[in-house]
Amino acid sequence: MNTKIINEVFNSLEIGKFDLAERKMSDSFSTTLVGNKVNKTEYLYAYKSLLQGIPDLKLNLKDVRLEGPVVKARLALSGTHVRPFPAIMDGWQDIAATGKSIDGYVSDIEIVLKNDKIEEIRNVDANKGMIVGLLGKLGLDYHKFQSN
């Protein structure tokens, strides 16, 4: 199982090396953020926004295991929301800093690799992805920041 690629992507996201993460993602990369299918550019933009708002953001992959063609893992996030999040997705509003900390929020994910690149990242619970859960832990209702 090639977990090196997966670790490199999440380590790169954590330290703001988005160009390195992008190179490990396929051109046809896709995922779903807040119910919307997005490509790698949109996915990376969401992480850039999160990192601006939570400069000490930590992304810790746990329980990484291969199940058939899919790598399953738990992604634990922690950090303090000390700056505003620029609009996380196209059409969203900026989100003011809450000053709140999160510690160990966990999102269960599935990762599909193809030709030594990440092809897809899926949240196991399609109704509660990483962004929805993270904002919830900060006491924020994501609906208030979405375009209508």
Image: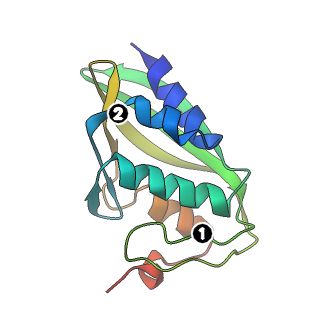
- Report if residue 97 is visible in the image: yes
Asked whether, in this view, residue 139 is left or right of residue 120, the answer is right
Q: Which image quarter holds the C terminus?
A: bottom left
Looking at the rendered structure, the secondary structure element under dot 2 is: strand
Mark number, residue 111: 2
Q: Quadrant of the N terminus?
A: top left
Q: Quadrant of residue 61?
A: top right
**With 30 as the anchor, is 54 left or right in this view?**
right
Q: Which mark is residue 85?
A: 1
Label located before the other in sequence (1 or 2):
1
* Depicted 89 relative to depicted 11: above or below: below
Q: Residue at (59%, 33%) from the top-left corner?
A: 11
Comparing 128 with 92, the one in front is 92
Colour scheme used in the picture? rainbow
Q: Is residue 12 left or right of residue 131?
A: right
Residue 27, compared with residue 45, is above or below; it is above
Q: Is residue 63 visible?
A: no
Instruction: Please give the name of the residue rendered at 27% of the width and 63% of the height, measured from the top-left corner.
Output: 36
Q: Secondary structure at mark 1?
A: loop
- Label 1 and label 2: CA atoms lie apart by 26 Å
Q: Of all residues shown, which one is farthest toward the top? A: 1
- Residue 92: quadrant of the picture: bottom left
Residue 64 is situated, as x and y percent measured from the top left of the image, at: 47, 25
At a point 69% along the width and 74% down the height, the residue shown is 97
- Residue kind at label 2, given as amino acid type: Ile
Q: Position of residue 99 (x, y in %)?
A: 76, 71
Instruction: In this rendered view, identify the residue nearer to me: 59 or 12.
Output: 12
Q: Amino acid at mark 1?
A: Phe
